[in-house]
Structure formats: C-alpha cells, structure tokens
C-alpha cells in the first residue's frame, strides 16, 4: 500500500477512500437505506428494460429513449454504490489508481449523457405535440439510433480529458481521498502539481454541455406550453400535458439534486464536508431509483405492458 505520509516522494499506486471523515459513525446507519435504494434502482430499471424489450407495443422511439436512460442510470449506480457499500460493510477503502480514474470518467461522462438524453426526450415531446403529423417521419428508429450515438460520442469525447488530465498529475505523497467516490477535485487536490487547468476544463466543459442541454429543454417546453394553450378542443390541453408530465418530473429530480450539489460545493466553507459527500452519493442513487418508478406509475402503456408480462408467467 502506498504511504500516506505527506513527506513521501514514492509514486502513489492506490488511493484510500475515507467516507465522512468527521462522522465515520454515519456509515453504519446509512448502509441500510443506501442498500434499499440501490436494490430499488437496479430492480426497477431492470424491470422497465425487460418490459420494453418483451412487449412489442412498446417498441417505439419514446420507450427506446427511456431504455437508454435506464441503462445510463444502472451503469452510474453500479460504478459508485457497490464500492460505497463495501467501504461501509467491510471497511475496504482502497481503490487502485486505474480503477479510480475509470470511475471518474464514467461519473463525469455518463452524468452528461443523462442530461443529453433528457434533451432528446424533450425534443421528442416537442415534435409529438407541436408537429404531430410529422412525428412518425421525424422521430424514427433511425433517429433514436443516431441520437444515441451522438449522446455517447459527444460526452465521452468532451469529458474524457477530465480524468486524463487528473491521471497525468504527479501523486507523490498523500493518497487519502476524503470522499466516498473518486471525484475529480477530491483526487486532484492530492497531487504535487498545479491542477488549475484540470479544474478550469471540468468547469467549462461541464457547464457548457449541461447548460446547452437545459437551454434546449427549456425552449422545447416553452414551445410545448405555447402550443398547448392554443388548443381549443375540450381536454386536449390536459391530455397533451399529461404526456409530458413524467418526463418533466424526471428532469426536475435530476436538475434539483444537481443544483443542490453545486450550491453546496460553492459554499464549501459553510457546508460541512460530510454533507457534501453524502449529497454526491445520493445524486448517483436517487434519480436512478425514482426515474423508472415515476414513469412506471404515470405511463399507462408501461403499466399495461408490465401487467401482460406478469400474466405470461402465470
């Protein structure tokens, strides 16, 4: 194991993750709710994917995009939560140098992929409500395939420099990360080099990608609302808005938790470090747990597909 001495010049080969450095007693009572949320996230997303896969009536672009969101949620959860639970249960805090930066890459890129997926889903709802006659010719299976490639490529390419820049830093002393996860700044602070470029790139790239996605989401829903207000048929407006309700709730979950994490990080001196660490962990767990549940309860077609799936097994 690499030395934790501040004066050692030996290169670091692994890191130690210290969850809640000031309140390590939290680990014991937090492990149960985190385990339940993790099981809910994995089970609900797996059920949603199986339902969409087996039910032919759900083989539509909107549900393909929802499947993509579920896959991203599951990868994010599997990247972060099992390691956190292993630390809580068995006190196995070490993580290899390469595994740490792989986790950093997945967390950064897949978070942006989720944001981009929400943007494409908002465009899907915009076309469905504002241009219903053109919807079948615009939102096709080919469109979803191209959008999926764009989502993966854009965010993986533009955010891969974050872990690369961090991995290229010289780690010659401390190897204790005061976090449950290999967050970029938590790791970079341990280096013997200046990491200003790393910090600036993450800030600019992250906010450019997330900001552009949320601007396009906002514009999509602005046009949707304007179109809905012009509907004259009785009940047409309510029906149109109900198709967007689940999607809007998911965006609200995602953006609210992200905003809380950002604000607490900005006011780091006023907010205890342990609270910030907990929010970072929950940000990778709560949206994946709630997304399939919200869609499952609010979408009639998904509920019917799940019921048919249960009837087949009887």
Image: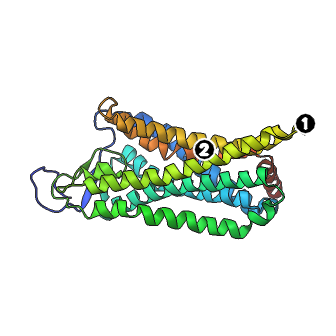
Cα separation, mark 2 vs mark 1, equals: 28 Å
| Image coordinates for residue 290, horizontal then vertical, percent | 61, 43
Write down the quadrant of residue 13 in the picture.
bottom left
Q: Is residue 256 left or right of residue 267?
A: right
The percent position of residue 81, horizontal first and vertical second, equals: 46, 49
Q: Is residue 82 visible?
A: no
Which SS class for mark 2?
helix
Q: Where, quadrant-wise, is the N terminus in this rendering?
A: bottom left
Outermost residue on the top side: it is: 270
Give me the disc on residue 251: 2
Q: Quick one: label 2 or label 1, which is nearer the N terminus?
A: 1
Snapshot quadrant of residue 37: top right
Q: Height in image: 69 above or below 280?
A: below
How is the structure coloured here?
rainbow
| 16 is higher (above) or lower (below) than 99 | above
Instruction: Determine the residue positioned at 46% across, 64% down.
Output: 156
Q: Which residue is at 63% across, 52% downward?
A: 45
Can you identify the residue that label 1 sits on?
A: 234
From the top left corner, tell me how far across and down residue 124 is, in percent: 71, 55
Q: Nearer the viewer, residue 163 or 200?
A: 200
How many labels were placed on the picture? 2
Q: Is residue 102 visible?
A: yes
The x, y position of residue 26, in whole percent, is 37, 34
- At x 62%, y 65%, the residue is 147
Q: Is residue 174 left or right of residue 34?
A: left
């Amino acid at each position: 194991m690499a030395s934790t001495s501040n004066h050692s010049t030996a290169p670091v080969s692994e890191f130690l993750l210290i969850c809640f450095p000031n309140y390590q007693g939290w680990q014991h009572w937090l492990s149960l709710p985190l385990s339940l949320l993790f099981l809910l996230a994995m089970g609900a997303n797996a059920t949603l994917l199986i339902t969409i896969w087996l039910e032919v009536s759900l083989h539509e672009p909107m549900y393909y995009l929802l499947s993509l969101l579920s896959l991203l949620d599951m990868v994010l959860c599997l990247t972060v939560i099992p390691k956190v639970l292993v630390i809580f249960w068995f006190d196995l805090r070490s993580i290899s140098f390469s595994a740490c930066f792989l986790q950093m890459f997945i967390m950064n890129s897949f978070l942006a992929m989720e944001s981009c997926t929400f943007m494409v889903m908002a465009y899907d709802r915009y076309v469905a409500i504002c241009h219903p006659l053109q919807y079948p010719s615009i939102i096709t299976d080919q469109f979803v395939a191209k959008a999926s490639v764009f989502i993966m490529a854009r965010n993986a390419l533009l955010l891969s420099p974050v872990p690369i820049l961090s991995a290229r830093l010289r780690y010659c002393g401390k190897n204790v990360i005061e976090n449950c996860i290999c967050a970029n700044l938590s790791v970079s602070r341990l280096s013997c080099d200046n990491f200003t470029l790393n910090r600036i790139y993450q800030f600019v790239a992250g906010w450019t990608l997330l900001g552009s996605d949320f601007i396009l989401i906002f514009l999509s829903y602005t046009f949707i609302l304007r179109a809905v207000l012009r509907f004259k048929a009785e009940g047409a407006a309510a029906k149109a808005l109900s198709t967007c309700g689940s999607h809007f709730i998911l965006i609200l979950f995602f953006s609210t938790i992200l905003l809380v994490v950002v604000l607490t990080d900005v006011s780091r001196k006023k907010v205890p470090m342990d609270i910030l660490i907990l929010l970072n962990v929950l940000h990778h767990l709560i949206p994946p747990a709630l997304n399939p549940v919200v869609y499952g309860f609010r979408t009639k077609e998904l509920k019917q597909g799940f019921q048919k799936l249960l009837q087949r097994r009887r």
